[in-house]
Amino acid sequence: QVHLVESGGDSVQAGGSLRLSCVATGLSHSRYSLAWFRQTPGKEREGVAGIVPRHSITYYADPVKGRFTISQDSAKNTVYLQMNSLEPEDTAMYYCAASTIYAYGRFDSQAFRYWGQGTQVTVSS
């Protein structure tokens, strides 16, 4: 059973930084991908960043390129999202998700079946 637990959400000023963490357990083989999504009330959930650990491939949505970095510590079963130069538009609930395929560049729900409960990020101007 895949289980994802996010942490690290907080309230920060614009221009600040946060690092989100997601402990992912139950991924019993190396053929998987992990991603961060975000959602605000009344809006569609959007993909933010993804990683295919076996091939060390990362990918990002355009709004966060150059500001956010996704990484993984396989020894700790943890994926991180380092968020720099935060903007009020980054305010959202952030979710960690796992896929049992190599989801190169994909953020669709057909690829990502497993989800955490989310962690809130609030950026004030």
Image (cartoon, helix red, strand yellow):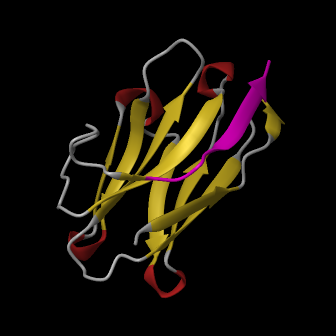
**Where does residue 32 sit, x and y in percent of width and height?**
26, 67
| Residue shown at 59% from the left, 49% from the top | 117
User: Does residue 4 belong to the magenta stretch?
Assistant: no
Judging depth in this view, the residue of 29 and 1 nearest the camera is 1
| Residue shown at 51% from the left, 34% from the top | 38
* Extent of the magenta region: 115-125
| Residue shown at 41% from the left, 29% from the top | 46
As drawn, which residue projects farthest toward the top?
Answer: 42
As drawn, which residue projects farthest toward the bottom?
Answer: 75
**Where does residue 34 sit, x and y in percent of width and height?**
36, 59
Task: Check the image and report above or below for 14 versus 42.
Answer: below
**Where does residue 37 sit, x and y in percent of width and height?**
46, 40
Q: Quadrant of residue 85?
A: top right
| Image quadrant occupied by the N terminus | bottom left
Judging depth in this view, the residue of 85 and 27 nearest the camera is 27
**Where does residue 20 sit, x and y in percent of width and height?**
63, 54
Q: Quadrant of residue 8?
A: bottom right
Q: Quadrant of residue 23?
A: bottom right
Task: Check the image and report above or below for 29 versus 60.
Answer: below
